[in-house]
Image: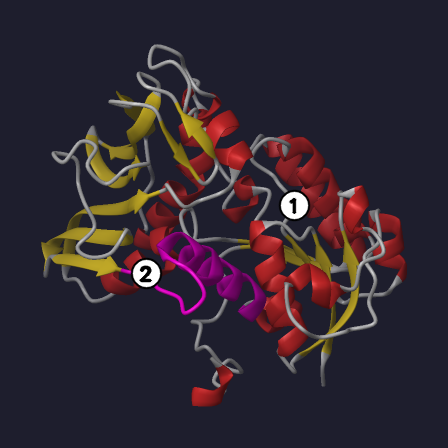
Amino acid sequence: MTIRVAQVATGNAGMLTLRQLIADDRFELVAVSTSSADKVGKDAGELAGVEVVTGISAVGDLDALIAAGPECVVYCAMGDTRPVAATNDVRRLLEAGIDVVGSAPGTLQYPWGTMPQKVIDKVEASAQAGQASVYITGVDPGFASDLVPLALASTCQRIEQIKCYELADYATYDGTEVMFDLMGFGSPVDSTPLLFLPGVLALAWGTAIRMMASGLGIEVDEIVEFWEAEPAPESYDIAAGRIEKGTIAALHFSISGLVDGHPAIVVEHVTRTRDDLRPDWARPSSGGGAYRIEITGEPSYVVDVVPSSEHGDHNHAAIVAACGRIVNAIPDVRAAAPGIRTTLDLPLPTGRGTYVGPSGA
């Protein structure tokens, strides 16, 4: 029996989840909403960039989407710069009895110890009122910093440290708001971008740190943040805009979960806008990007997950991977108990329903 689904937002991630919702016969698309006035009224197929007329026209508000009667909503609206609004949207959907899977707000991936308890209580109350569940995930924070390292950890006799990296060249990533407003690319090197204000890194990646800790059966005592920036040696353009000489062109940051003073769980990012910047910082093993998991223990591991796509480069492939994880979780979230659900709650993923053979590329 197909699941009635709706899509919120059709940006970089939403467009790709929408494509799968249209093509995947496990789902029946019943509504799409957008915050862009110029997209209202357009067919979902056009917004997904596919040559399919779905007969589903985009609406401009959640009320109209809720009225279509979806059983589950894929929520991909921006949450990094509007966490309160995104959380309130999710609560409205839950109270309407609609399950939610999505990419935002990121703090709902594992909110305990990161999000204020009163906010967690409100989300849980909304879920119980509507007897609905919410599951938020992505790449990192997401499966590269919870599902994959915990799967490897399950084979170890002992573990001293888990370290998860994102190593990527973002020159082709066109998310202007994320690149410039959040991460601070193109800003003066002596400025402090939004992402690096005290506590923001811990808020954003504390979900992954604490979820991994919970999976290991340990508790993190403290989360420590670190960041450094590299200036552009000259002015040049990237997909998101222009990087002027002397402004931020590469970033290295980490979030460390300490246990008895030891960095037991670490998430580290190296983000360049040009491949030749800071060759001394960690690099992917191949291509323009990778998600690396290092486990120090018995046995120890160094595993690079290198995403690729027939329809774009490593940046596009990473977003596709996040979207696949979100959409493929829908049946399990539908079957889950009401409330905030995490990767630790859901069954081990199998990819069930995604195999279509060589002609489905």
Image coordinates for residue 352, horizontal then vertical, percent? 49, 81
Amino acid at circle 2: Val
> Which residue lies at the image location 88% right of the left edge and 50% below the top edge?
63
Residue 350 appearing in the image? yes
Which numbered dot is residue 296? none
Image coordinates for residue 71, horizontal then vertical, percent? 76, 67
When the figure is inspected, residue 285 is found, relative to residue 197, above or below; the finding is: below
Q: Nearer the viewer, residue 323 or 92?
A: 323
Q: Residues within 10 Å of mark 1 (few under 14, many from 20)?
A: many
Of mark 1 and mark 2, the one earlier in the sequence is: 1
Specify how the rendered protein is coloured: secondary structure
Q: Which residue is mark 2?
A: 148
Query: Is residue 312 part of the magenta span, yes or no?
Result: yes
The CA distance from mark 1 to mark 2 is 25 Å
> Which residue lies at the image location 82% right of the left edge and 51% below the top edge?
40
Residue 337 appearing in the image? no
> Which residue lies at the image location 90% right of the left edge and 59% below the top edge?
67
> Which residue lies at the image location 48% right of the left edge and 71% below the top edge?
347
The main secondary structure of the magenta stretch is helix
Amino acid at circle 1: Ala
Q: Secondary structure at mark 1?
A: loop
When the figure is inspected, residue 264 is found, relative to residue 347, above or below; the finding is: above
Query: Which range is magenta?
Result: 306-328
Q: Which residue is mark 1?
A: 77
Query: Is residue 342 part of the magenta span, yes or no?
Result: no
Image coordinates for residue 249, horizontal then vertical, percent? 32, 27
